[in-house]
């Protein structure tokens, strides 16, 4: 499959074969004789397809999927939404991308052609959102996408049937440099950007923006995901005297790199890493106290001042209901289904053209903030900065240390240099 740093080519998707999708029929959901058909009692079963990386190196993004899906199905059923003239009951068919772009496209096609879903939702990095969005464009299937930076997602466009909400690369650059500017450094930045859609997009955007802001960027070049030896990379950073590290590696690669930094006695003043340290499990996996002081972007926390459009519950209530330590995808996966329910309620139909029109007119306050799409089918959500510190209830806590990009989201700690 071709990757050129500009997303995943839709023509590549056209050549993908149809694969099997793994479905999840949730307890309490009514089963129809035909997916997407009507069930007894004057109801209409609405089937929503959901593609996410349930296995593979991106699986941490989807760890809360089953919890959220069960929760939103109950909430949607309780809303009394009328679709195609009947009260809607909801079923979500989940499909595993296996953290593989080719597989993501295959299972999306299987959901559309085999399971006859009425609407698609997708999340979790461009490796998932882009091929699923491309498949939906080809099939003329309305799709709601999130949990991938806007720029890399847009590179697969233009889009007619898919709508995406999240933050963009200029937003995270503002957050990262905003954090860095609170500490005295030599403004030399070491980059860690893999050879994947995220890495290529981030390398280009960060290098230009940081250079314009007076930073010196030390770029060791792209590396393949799954790399285990970062000795040469660390040595380049040390030789340049880089006091800042940034990048967007997958969790196992960052763990290997950061341990090797420690082994070689290299400790920058600040390390702001996208993707790899978003989740408690990934941070704990670093071992010892290596997570102390690492910083990252924050899309959602229990402290965010937003609530559900389905039930009215707060961000804190959603996090408190989750049986494990909260993680950022909780809010955004929930919001995907909030938007889906709102679109179906306004369209009052599963007609694809009507759903597309309703998607374009979306204006909804969600668990992650207001969602409204522009003429490129993009909605922007707020972004702040956070830092991992020793926890109380759990080993590590992610605290909000920078909020100038979204003052309504309160800070919960002050940024400190590593070590």
Image: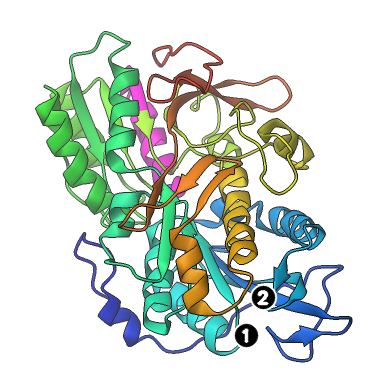
Q: What stretch of residues is rendered in magenta?
A: 250-271
Q: Is residue 268 magenta?
A: yes
Distance, label 1 to label 2, CA atoms, is: 8 Å
Residue 163 sits above or below residue 82 on the image:
above
Q: Can you tell which mark lies on residue 28?
A: none
Q: Is residue 60 left or right of residue 223?
A: right
Label 1 neighbourhood size at 10 Å, few (<14), some (14-19), many (20+)? Answer: many
Q: Single out the residue that lies furthest toward the top.
A: 184
Q: Which residue is mark 2?
A: 47
Q: Is residue 414 left or right of residue 314?
A: left
Cβ–Cβ below 8 Å for labels 1 and 2? yes
The percent position of residue 190, horizontal first and vertical second, equals: 22, 32
**Residue at left offset 18%, top offset 21%:** 241
Q: Which residue is mark 1?
A: 115
Instruction: Please say whether residue 268 is visible from this viewpoint.
Output: no
**Quarter of the image holding residue 90?**
bottom right
Residue 181 sits above or below residue 173 on the image:
above
């Amino acid at each position: 499959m071709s990757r050129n740093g500009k997303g995943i080519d839709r023509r590549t998707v056209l050549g993908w074969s149809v694969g099997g999708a793994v479905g999840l029929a949730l307890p309490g959901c009514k089963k129809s004789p035909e997916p997407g058909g009507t069930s007894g009692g004057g109801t209409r079963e609405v089937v929503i397809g959901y593609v996410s990386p349930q296995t593979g190196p991106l699986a941490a993004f989807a760890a809360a999927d089953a919890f959220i899906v069960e929760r939103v199905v109950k909430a949607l059923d309780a809303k009394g939404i009328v679709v195609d003239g009947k009260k809607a009951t909801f079923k979500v068919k989940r499909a595993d991308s296996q953290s593989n772009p080719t597989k993501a496209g295959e299972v999306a096609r299987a959901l559309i052609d085999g399971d006859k879903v009425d609407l698609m939702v997708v999340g979790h990095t461009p490796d998932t959102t882009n091929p699923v969005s491309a498949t939906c464009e080809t099939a003329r299937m309305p799709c709601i996408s999130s949990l991938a930076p806007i720029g890399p997602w847009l590179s697969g466009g233009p889009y007619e049937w898919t709508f995406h909400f999240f933050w963009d690369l200029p937003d995270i650059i503002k957050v990262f440099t905003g954090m860095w500017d609170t500490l005295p450094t030599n403004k030399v930045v070491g980059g860690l950007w893999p050879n994947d859609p995220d890495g290529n997009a981030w390398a280009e955007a960060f290098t230009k923006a940081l250079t314009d802001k007076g930073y010196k960027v030390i770029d060791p070049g792209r590396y393949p995901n799954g790399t285990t030896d970062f000795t040469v990379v660390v040595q380049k950073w040390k030789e340049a005297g880089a006091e800042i590290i940034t990048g967007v590696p997958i969790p196992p690669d960052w763990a290997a790199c950061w341990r090797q930094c420690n082994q070689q006695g290299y400790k920058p003043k600040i390390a702001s890493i996208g993707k790899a340290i978003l989740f408690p499990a990934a941070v704990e996996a670093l071992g010892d106290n290596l997570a102390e002081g690492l910083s990252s972007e924050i899309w959602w926390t229990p402290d965010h001042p937003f609530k559900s459009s389905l039930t009215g519950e707060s961000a804190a209530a959603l996090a408190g209901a989750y049986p494990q330590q909260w993680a950022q995808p909780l809010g955004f996966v929930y919001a995907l289904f909030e938007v889906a329910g709102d679109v179906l309620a306004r369209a009052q139909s599963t007609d694809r053209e009507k759903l597309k029109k309703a998607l374009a007119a979306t204006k909804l306050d969600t668990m992650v903030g207001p969602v409204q799409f522009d003429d490129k089918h993009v909605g922007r959500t707020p972004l702040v900065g956070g830092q991992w510190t020793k926890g109380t209830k759990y080993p590590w806590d992610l605290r909000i240390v920078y909020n100038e990009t979204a003052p309504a989201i309160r800070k919960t700690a002050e940024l400190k240099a590593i070590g």
